[in-house]
């Protein structure tokens, strides 16, 4: 699932259901892992980094999301008014036929690649709306869905992380730090990874940026 912006929600909704008709004729969870206590920190961001890495080790996808920038309001590209309107309109107009069409199409990478970005957005958003238990899904719900989709499809998640060691955390500039981490994957191979963390003023917390 990719994140794509649009400025024309009403037009997109109309196009979506016309497209389907033509074809027929033819809750942010937080990590349960508490930061370690009683040791000297390399940097103020270390607790956040450890929560993120612990969540990877334990296969806690919600915990990874909670420790990541995507869980913050500052990251919500979908919070723009037009996208919020699109979510609302699709929630009202979805039906069993359109939901099944969206599920089938978004499961077929080749078919999706033939569509424009606007069409891909419509079907991705419609599938999200159809699969949500909430009557009125939010931008936060969508942001989490996109993030977890990418996370669980990634090689690192599939292989798994069994151990990690933080080698160093350096202040890049005010409100931004860079961590150098050694990860031991499920295949027992060693992966050296650089992780950027940023400080969110509104939430007064550090989160992993990438």
Image: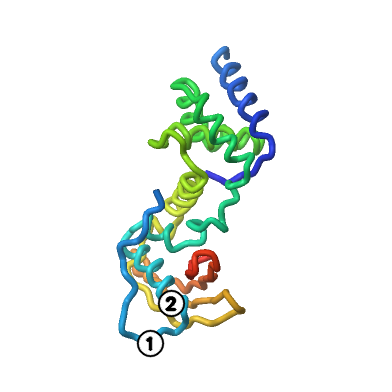
Query: Is there a contact, CB below 8 Å, between mark 2 and mark 1?
Result: no
Residue shown at the point (62%, 44%) measured from the top left: 4
Q: Compare residues 79 and 165 and report the one nearer the observer.
A: 79
**Vertical comparison of 39 with 188: above or below:** below
Residue 151: give x, y in percent of width and height: 45, 54
Q: Which mark is residue 40?
A: 1
Residue shown at the point (51%, 71%) measured from the top left: 195
- The alpha-carbon separation of the residues under discs 2 and 1 comes to 10 Å
Label 1 packing within 10 angstroms: few (<14), some (14-19), many (20+): few
Q: Compare residues 208 and 191 and report the one nearer the observer.
A: 208
Q: Which mark is residue 46?
A: 2
Label 2 packing within 10 angstroms: few (<14), some (14-19), many (20+): many
Q: Is residue 41 in view from this perspective?
A: yes
Q: Compare residues 149 and 205 and report the one nearer the observer.
A: 205
Describe the colour scheme in one phrase. rainbow
Furthest residue in direction top, as rendered: 25
Q: Which quarter of the figure has residue 89? A: top right
**Vertical comparison of 74 with 122: above or below:** below
Residue 29: give x, y in percent of width and height: 37, 54
Residue 121: give x, y in percent of width and height: 59, 37
Residue shown at the point (52%, 32%) measured from the top left: 126
């Amino acid at each position: 699932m990719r994140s794509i912006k649009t400025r024309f929600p009403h037009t997109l909704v109309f196009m979506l259901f016309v497209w389907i008709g033509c074809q027929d004729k033819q809750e942010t969870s937080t990590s349960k892992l508490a930061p370690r206590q009683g040791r000297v920190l390399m940097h103020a961001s270390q607790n956040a980094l450890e929560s993120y890495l612990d969540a990877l080790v334990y296969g806690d996808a919600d915990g990874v999301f909670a420790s990541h920038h995507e869980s913050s309001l500052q990251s919500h590209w979908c919070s723009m008014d037009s996208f919020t309107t699109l979510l609302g309109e699709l929630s009202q107009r979805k039906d069993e036929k359109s939901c099944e069409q969206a599920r089938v199409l978004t499961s077929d990478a080749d078919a999706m690649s033939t569509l424009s970005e606007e069409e891909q957005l419509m079907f991705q958003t419609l599938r999200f709306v159809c699969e949500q238990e909430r009557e009125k899904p939010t931008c936060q719900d969508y942001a989490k869905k996109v993030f977890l989709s990418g996370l669980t499809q990634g090689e690192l998640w599939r292989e798994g992380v069994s151990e990690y060691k933080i080698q160093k955390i350096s202040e890049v500039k005010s409100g931004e730090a860079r961590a150098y981490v050694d990860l031991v994957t499920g295949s027992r191979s060693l992966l050296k990874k650089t992780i950027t963390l940023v400080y969110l003023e509104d939430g007064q917390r550090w989160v992993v940026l990438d």
